[in-house]
Image (cartoon, rainbow, N blue to C red):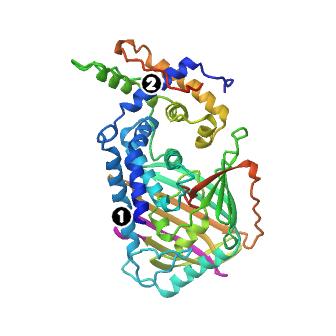
Amino acid sequence: MRPDLEESFAAFVRARGEHHLRVAVLLTGSATEAEDLVQTSLVKLYRAWPRLDVSSSSPDAYLRKIIVNTRRSWWRARWRQESPIASVPDRPDPVEGGGDPADRQAVGSLVRAALAGLPRQQRAVLVLRYLEDLAEAEVASLLGCSVGSVKTHAHRGLRALRGSLGDLDEFAVNETAAPDGEKG
Amino acid sequence: MEDVQEVDACVVAEGRRLLATAFETATAGDGLAGSGMAGAELLRRVRRRTRRQRRARALVPAGAVAALGGAAALAVTLTATVASAPSAFAAVSAAAAKTSAESFRVTMHGTSNELGSTSHWEVTGEFAPSRGVGEEAVNSGKITVLYVGKHIYQNVQNIPGAGKPWDEFKIWPMTATEIATSPQFGGEQAADPGVLLSLLKSAGTVIDEGPASGLGWTGTKYGFTVATPKDTQVATGTVDVDGKGQVRRLLETFTVAVGRGRHFTFTEDVTFSGFNIPVTVTVPPAGQVSVFNGYVLSPYGGF
């Protein structure tokens, strides 16, 4: 690859790699699988990089599509056995002397465990719709389903997520302001 | 499925906050995510994997045939102690070229296997590789793929109400090296049999295995192997060539090393028939197509 293209690819991975890795952790429910998935997807992106017109097409959107498609083909090929947990694990004991960061870590751990317990499509809709902030039509296109299905999975997924988490008040997570342009 | 309904805004807001917390506190594997070094470490690992693939392309053995599309020759090693009989290699190479020059009907049965867990897929279609057109249905029409010149059109699940039903990509012509070193088709993605035929032209070992026959034809069965250095990816199989020099059946097994000592096996069983049938592919109306400007799709395996 030309040196300028190598550098642009490297800059993209340095800037956005961790973001996609974190999203993949939520998508797959497995830290190890997330690493494999993102690395495999980045290798595919690297091969395509010289052919991409990054001025008119977002590498993020393309990488996201690669990740979703790769994961879907892995799942269908039974390469990655998904074993949703039957119940949310016991809440971790608060870190001795820990303050808000530890509580936040604990809540994050609970949410990830609850996500992992959701059906695959619900989990993907929640992550793509409410974390990646994609429009319903874009989520439908990525997942190969109808907009109506996206709405239904979102509704059921949020309800199931909330039901799994139960009462989080004991962790006293600091509420942050609602994001601008909150979508319904 | 229950009636579609909008989600309460408060529930959505809470969901967003919870997901944001899960995202911000996520770690991965060796504690990569959240380390502040994740991007650099990812880059290092991706470069290591792509360097392995570049090394596979670096060797050009004598007699290697340029892959379809005129790109660099496949890097292959002879994996058998018995050298290929010149006539066997020539027969297989010629059959691949002749079949690619004709139109045909194709059925592909695929199987993937890892640690005893198996899944299957089926592709049926009609292709005219010399004219750059083809149409196939994957897994009973869950995905329909059209090949038209330099473009691929994919229609996933033909779901009404999903916005524009077709996605259009530019085709990324695959060299034989890329075919041999890329993750293989394992699900509902584009599967151009011409790509598998092109791999035959770069086989490192070809052996005459005796007579072969089918409905209305007789011919010869050949065994072949295509391997990359260090055996990161190996393709073995048999190809049946009829008395007219056409490929009738191609049975290939790909063994892919996927790291951590694991291997993944794909098998493709491809039958060719209906030679020289008329093949007409109609491009979907523009209003039904989402064009992915600047994006490319490989004709075998998608991304």
Q: Is residue B163 magenta?
A: no
- Please identify the residue farthest to the left as the structure is shown: A97
Residue at 65% from the left image edge and 59% from the top image edge:
B152
Residue B219 appears in the rendering: no
Vertical position of residue A29 compared to residue B212: above or below: above
Q: Residues within 10 Å of mark 1 (few under 14, many from 20)?
A: some
Chain of the residue that carries numbered disc 2 in the rendered image: B
- Residue B21: x, y in percent? 40, 27
Instruction: Choose top left, top right, bottom left or bottom right for residue A3.
Output: bottom left
Vertical position of residue B64 compared to residue A162: above or below: below
Chain of the residue that carries numbered disc 1 in the rendered image: B
Q: Which residues are magenta?
A: B227-245
Residue at 59% from the left image edge and 29% from the top image edge:
A153
Please give left or right for residue A81 compared with residue B170 in the image: left
Residue named by callout 1:
B52
Residue named by callout 2:
B18
- Residue A170: x, y in percent? 35, 12
